[in-house]
Image (cartoon, rainbow, N blue to C red):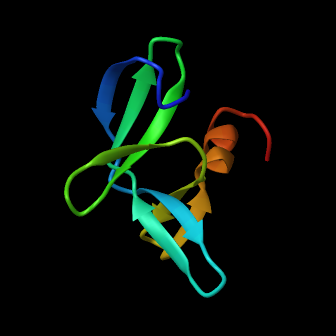
């Protein structure tokens, strides 16, 4: 998906999905607010700034927060394990 693909559906994201963003000093976890489906069938995760502007994130580490352990785990690993894929 690119910023120019036609979005045909947007759904709210689960409350426990985040983008992991790192710089040389810190790691940030940015909440994912919605999931977008394009006319091409691609899926993109979106975040929002303080002004409410929704931005499609074309790359980034999607993480799932586990409140029972207080940790963030890679979303793709969780999905693969649930579907019987890569571990």
Please tell me whether residue 18 is drawn above or below residue 25 in the rendered image.
above
Please tell me whether residue 15 is drawn above or below residue 79 in the rendered image.
below
Q: Residue at x 45, y 12 (%)?
A: 39
In this view, the residue farthest toward the left is 51
- Please state, as top left, top right, bottom left or bottom right, where the N terminus lies in the image: top right
Judging depth in this view, the residue of 27 and 75 nearest the camera is 27
Q: How many marks?
A: 0
Please tell me whether residue 76 is drawn above or below residue 68 in the rendered image.
above
Q: Residue at x 45, y 71 (%)?
A: 68
Judging depth in this view, the residue of 43 and 53 nearest the camera is 53
Residue 3 image point, x, y percent: 48, 31
Judging depth in this view, the residue of 63 and 6 nearest the camera is 6
Judging depth in this view, the residue of 61 and 84 nearest the camera is 61
In this view, the residue farthest toward the bottom is 25
Asked whether, in this view, residue 69 is left or right of residue 80, the answer is: left
> Quadrant location of residue 85?
top right
Residue 74 image point, x, y percent: 63, 56
In this view, the residue farthest toward the right is 86
> Quadrant location of residue 63?
bottom right
Asked whether, in this view, residue 71 is left or right of residue 83, the answer is: left
Residue 17 image point, x, y percent: 44, 54
Residue 45 image point, x, y percent: 46, 41
In this view, the residue farthest toward the top is 39
Q: Residue at x 56, y 67 (%)?
A: 21
């Amino acid at each position: 998906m690119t910023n120019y693909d036609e979005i045909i559906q947007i759904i709210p994201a689960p409350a426990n999905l985040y983008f992991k963003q790192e710089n040389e000093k810190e790691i940030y976890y940015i909440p994912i607010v919605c999931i977008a489906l394009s006319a091409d069938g691609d899926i993109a995760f979106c975040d929002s700034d303080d002004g409410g502007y929704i931005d499609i994130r074309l790359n980034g580490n999607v993480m799932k927060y586990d409140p029972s352990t207080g940790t963030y785990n890679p979303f793709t690993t969780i999905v693969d394990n649930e579907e019987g894929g890569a571990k």
